[in-house]
C-alpha cells in the first residue's frame, strides 16, 4: 500500500455554461505544478447546480465526459466530479470517475435535495461506487448524501477483514447559509468511518444568487482538519499518508465494534 496524491479544485462556476466551465477547469488542471494522481472537481462542475436538465443534460458521449477522458489521458490522472447526464430518458446527477485509460466508473446521486426540487428533475441512484487505485478503496458521494451516514457507512468486509474503503470523497454545491452543517458533517464522516475524507465545494453566487463559501476540506481519520479553504478559488495538492491511516486503525480498531446492519 502506497501514499496517494490528490488535488482539490475549489472554483466559481460559470452558470449553465458548459463550454466556459470546461475551459476554466482545463486551465486550472494545467496550472497544477505538483505531481498528482486524483483531481477532484465540484458537483455539477460543468453547469452549476441547475434544475434545467432538459436544456443542459449531455449523454456519456457528450462534450464534458469527452473532456474528462481527454484530460485524464493527457495528464495521466484520475478526474472526478459530477455532471448532468441523460440516460434512457432519465436525468441523473452523475459522478464520473474517469481514469487515464478512458474507463469511467459512475455513481448516480442517491439523496436528491428535495428542498431545491432536485427530486422533481432528476432520478435517484440506488448503488454505491467504491473505486480502487493503488490499493486505496474510495467511496464516492455527492453533496446532500453527506447528511445520511448509513449510505456512506464503512464496515469491515468479512471476506478480507478490512474496512470497505479508505477515503470518502464528497463533491458539492453546498450554500454558505448551511456551511456549519457542511463542515461538521465532513468531520463526522471521517471520524465515524475512520478514513480520510475530502469535500470539494464551489464558491461564489450561482444563477439563483445563492452564495457558496466553499470550505472545501481534507480531514484525517481522527477528525483533524488538514486543509480547509473558505470563499476564494483554490487549488490544493497533498499526499494522503497510508501508514498513518493503517496505524490509526491498528491502534484504535473500533470499526469492528460497529452495529451490524445492511449497507445498500
Image (spheres, rainbow, N blue to C red):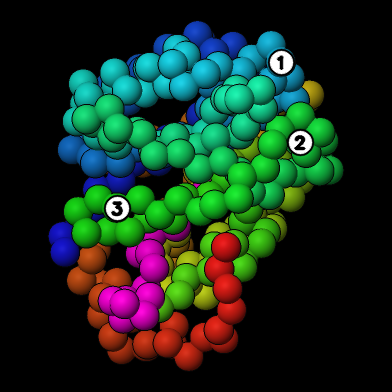
**Does 198 appear above or below 253?**
above
Q: Within the image, what quadrant is residue 109 found in?
A: top right
Q: Which residue is depicted at the point 59% across and 79% down?
A: 261
* Residue with the mark numbered 1: 54
Secondary element at image label 3: strand
Foreground: 82 or 211? 82
Tell me, for residue 132, which label it has, or none.
3
Residue stretch in magenta: 157-170
Separation of residues labelled 3 and 1 (CA atoms): 33 Å
Separation of residues labelled 2 and 3 (CA atoms): 29 Å
The quarter in which the N terminus is drawn is bottom left
Q: Looking at the picture, how far across and down is residue 201, in whole percent?
A: 55, 40
* Residue with the mark numbered 2: 118
Residue furthest top in the image:
19
Residue 78 part of the magenta segment: no
Secondary element at image label 1: helix
The quarter in which the C terminus is drawn is bottom right
**Callout 2–callout 3 Cβ contact below 8 Å:** no
Q: Which residue is depicted at the point 25% across and 80% down?
A: 247
Classify 10 Å Cα crowding around label 2: few (below 14), some (14-19), many (20 and above).
Answer: some
**Callout 1–callout 2 Cβ contact below 8 Å:** no
**Reading the chain from its start, which is encountered first: label 2 or label 3?**
2
Q: Within the image, what quadrant is residue 66 found in?
A: top left
Amino acid at each position: 500500500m502506497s501514499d496517494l496524491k490528490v488535488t482539490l479544485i475549489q472554483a466559481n462556476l460559470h452558470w449553465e455554461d458548459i463550454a466556459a466551465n470546461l475551459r476554466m477547469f482545463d486551465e486550472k488542471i494545467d496550472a497544477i505544478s505538483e505531481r498528482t494522481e486524483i483531481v477532484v472537481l465540484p458537483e455539477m462542475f460543468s453547469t452549476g447546480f441547475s434544475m434545467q436538465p432538459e436544456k443542459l443534460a449531455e449523454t456519456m458521449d457528450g462534450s464534458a465526459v469527452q473532456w474528462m477522458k481527454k484530460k485524464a489521458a493527457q495528464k495521466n490522472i484520475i478526474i472526478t466530479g459530477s455532471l448532468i447526464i441523460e440516460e434512457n430518458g432519465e436525468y441523473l446527477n452523475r459522478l464520473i470517475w474517469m481514469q487515464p485509460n478512458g474507463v469511467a466508473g459512475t455513481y448516480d446521486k442517491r439523496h436528491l435535495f428535495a428542498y431545491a426540487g432536485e427530486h422533481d428533475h432528476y432520478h435517484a441512484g440506488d448503488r454505491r461506487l467504491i473505486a480502487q487505485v493503488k490499493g486505496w478503496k474510495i467511496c464516492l458521494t455527492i453533496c446532500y448524501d453527506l447528511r445520511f451516514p448509513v449510505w456512506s457507512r464503512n464496515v469491515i468486509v468479512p471476506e478480507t477483514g478490512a474496512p470497505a474503503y479508505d477515503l470518502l470523497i464528497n463533491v458539492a454545491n453546498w450554500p454558505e447559509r448551511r456551511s456549519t452543517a457542511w463542515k461538521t458533517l465532513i468531520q463526522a464522516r471521517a471520524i465515524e468511518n475512520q478514513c480520510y475524507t475530502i469535500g470539494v465545494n464551489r464558491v461564489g453566487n450561482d444563477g439563483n444568487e445563492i452564495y457558496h463559501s466553499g470550505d472545501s476540506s481534507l480531514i484525517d481519520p481522527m477528525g483533524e482538519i488538514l486543509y480547509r479553504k473558505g470563499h476564494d478559488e483554490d487549488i490544493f495538492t497533498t499526499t494522503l499518508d497510508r501508514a498513518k491511516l493503517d496505524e490509526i486503525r491498528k491502534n484504535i480498531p473500533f470499526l469492528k465494534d460497529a452495529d451490524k446492519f445492511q449497507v445498500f
